[in-house]
Image (cartoon, rainbow, N blue to C red):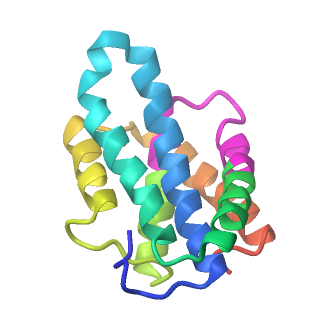
Amino acid sequence: MVAVSTRLSARQTVELLVLVGMLSALVRSVRQGLGEHGVELDACIDLLGQALLEPLAEVQPDQHRKLSRRSERATLRAMTTLATGESSYAVQFFAVARLIVGLTECGAITVVDGSAFDQAWNLLLHRGFGHVDPEGEAAAEELAERVWTVLRSDGYFV
């Protein structure tokens, strides 16, 4: 998501891991539900796996597990918030997409052209992820705000 040469704080590293983790969890769930029809998502899952490693590239080994655990806890809280209610995967994806776009627009994160995350993102958009009707879009906007509120309450993206 960011250039590997950029030195990230522990908080920034966890923030990136949470965003990629949420997207990865959604794609894996969709892939599982599609069975043999979801094979084209395997490349995206692999790219998101690479994107999960990028923020940890310059992390000292003793901090690696600590940051991974922190990101897993924050991702679980965010995903629990995302999964509340009866929203579809499309609405959930759109909510995560809206969150990522909003964070990019305000300068909180940077998506590097050609990075593993960028490639996965483009594959998902090409596949039609995130297309929802106006009612779904409104639900996704509200959901994105709830997830962002949870993340901020944990000290991320403040």
Q: Is residue 135 visible?
A: no
Residue 55 appears left or right of 76: left
Question: In the rendered view, would you say 29 is above or below 105?
Answer: above
As for residue 73 lying within the magenta part, the answer is no
**Span highlighted in magenta in the image:** 76-94
Question: In the rendered view, would you say 40 is above or below 153?
Answer: above
Q: Is residue 75 visible?
A: yes
Give me the residue at 45% from left, 84% from top. 107
Give me the residue at 29% from left, 58% from top. 116
Q: Position of residue 83 (x, y in %)?
A: 66, 36
Give me the residue at 30% from left, 31% from top. 41
As for residue 80 lying within the magenta part, the answer is yes
Taking depth in this image into account, of 68 and 14 the one nearest to the observer is 68
Q: Position of residue 35 (x, y in %)?
A: 37, 12
Give me the residue at 51% from left, 69% from top. 56
Check the image and name the residue furthest to the front: 61
Quarter of the figure with the N terminus: bottom left
Task: Place residue 97 in its image quadrant.
Answer: bottom left
